Amino acid sequence: MAEPLPEVGTLIMIMMPSNPEHLPAYQHRSPFALANESGAPRFLRLSQVIEMTGVGKTFIYTHMEKGNFPRQIQISPRTVVWLEQDIIDWMEKKIQRK
C-alpha cells in the first residue's frame, strides 16, 4: 500500500539524480516549473510575483516600463496578472547571466 500524500503546505524533498542527463527527456524541467505541472497557463497576482522573484513592487513596475520584466495582463478593470511561465522564463534568463 502506498504512503498517504502529505498535507497541503508540507515541505517535501524530491531526490534528483546527480546527473540530470540520465533522466528521460520529458523529465528535463526547470526547477521552477514544478509550480504548475499540468502545463496549463497560470495567472499570478502581484503578491505572488513578488514572493516568487524576491523583488519588490517598485522594481517590477520600473523594469516593466523599461522592457526588462514581463508585462502584466489586465483581465478586468481592476485586476492585473502575470503569466507564471513568463516569470519563470525571466528568472531562468537572470540565472543564465550569472
Image (cartoon, rainbow, N blue to C red):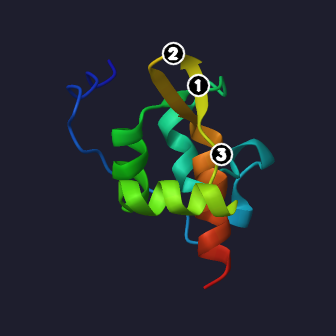
Q: CA distance from mark 1 to mark 2?
A: 7 Å
> What is the x, y in percent for residue 54?
36, 61
Mark 2 element type: loop
Q: In the rendered view of the protein, which quadrant contains the C terminus?
A: bottom right
Type of amino acid at the residue the image marks with label 3: Asp
Badge 1 vs badge 2, beta-carbon distance below 8 Å: yes
User: Given the current orientation, which residue lies at the most extreme top position?
Assistant: 76
Mark 1 element type: strand
* 93 in relation to 33, above or below: below
> What is the x, y in percent for residue 11?
24, 44
Type of amino acid at the residue the image marks with label 2: Pro
* Residue at 52% in and 61% down: 62
* Residue at 50% in and 28% down: 80
> According to the image, label 2 marks what residue?
77
Q: Looking at the image, is mark 3 or mark 1 earlier in the sequence?
A: 1
> What is the x, y in percent for residue 13?
33, 51
Pick the residue in front: 98 or 73: 73
Q: Looking at the image, is mark 2 or mark 3 earlier in the sequence?
A: 2
Residue 13 shows in the view? yes
Callout in the foreground (3, 1): 1
Q: Residues within 10 Å of mark 1 (few under 14, many from 20)?
A: few
Mark 3 element type: helix
> What is the x, y in percent for residue 45?
42, 33
> According to the image, label 3 marks what residue?
86
Q: CA distance from mark 2 to mark 3?
A: 22 Å
